[in-house]
Image: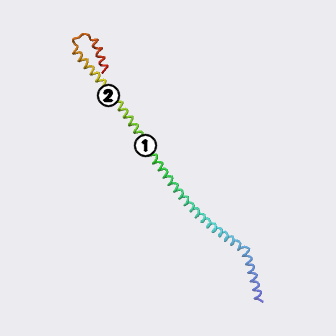
Amino acid sequence: MNINLTLFAQAITFAAFIWFTAKFVWPPLMRAVEARQKQIADGLAAGERGKQDLEQAAKRTEELLREARQKAQEILAHADKRAVELIEEAKAAAKTQGEQLVAGAKAEIDQEVFRAKEMLRAQVAALAVTGAEKILRREVDAKAHADLLRAVEAEL
């Protein structure tokens, strides 16, 4: 009988131990395990999101680099075009300025030619007056001779 009573007491103690463990020990352990599983699952999901974000960032970076290269090419093309325009404008301005200088030089040359003609005309008139004076010293009518010389001077 002792074995049965001992066996029965051990069964009751074991049942009490299982009940105590199921009631007070098992729930905190399960909560800790579930919390750890949730934390691991969240970490894996965050890692996956991070990987996707990294891929998207790499794509966006590549797109931005492509756009930046395209923009740089557009800026260079615009700068080249503007440089050509500036060169053409400078050529046109230089041509206009050259034409103005040539026109000014021609006007100055014309003025110098006119002055030279006037000086020559005055010298020829003076020589004619001097020559006529020497030839006509014998005649006394100076007024008639002066009118005649002015007419000759005007013709020259």
Residue 5's quadrant in the figure? bottom right
Q: Please determine whether, in this image, residue 109 is positioned above or below residue 8.
A: above
**What residue is shown at x 31% (from left), y 17% (from top)?**
151
Q: Quadrant of the C terminus?
A: top left
Task: Give the mark nearest the N terminus, 2 or 1.
Answer: 1
Q: Residue furthest bottom?
A: 1
Residue 25's quadrant in the figure? bottom right
- How many numbered discs sit on the rendered protein? 2
Residue 34: where, in percent of width, then height? 67, 70
**What residue is shown at x 73% (from left), y 75% (from top)?**
22
Residue at the disc numbered 2? 113
SS for callout 2: helix
Residue 40: where, in percent of width, then height? 63, 68
Left or right of residue 70: residue 13: right
Residue 103: where, in percent of width, then height? 37, 33
Q: Please determine whether, in this image, residue 99 is positioned above or below residue 131.
A: below
The type of residue carrying mark 2 is: Val
Left or right of residue 105: residue 24: right
Q: Which mark is residue 8?
A: none
SS for callout 1: helix
Residue 51 versus residue 36: which sits nearer the camera?
A: 51
Residue at the disc numbered 1? 88
Whole-number angstrom distance, CA of label 2 to CA of label 1 = 37 Å
Left or right of residue 51: residue 90: left
Circle 1: is it few (<14), some (14-19), or many (20+) Cα within 10 Å? few
**What residue is shown at x 25% (from left), y 19% (from top)?**
128
Q: Please determine whether, in this image, residue 30 is positioned above or below residue 13.
A: above
Circle 2: is it few (<14), some (14-19), or many (20+) Cα within 10 Å? few
Q: Residue furthest top?
A: 140
Left or right of residue 107: residue 43: right
Q: Quadrant of the N terminus?
A: bottom right
The type of residue carrying mark 1 is: Glu
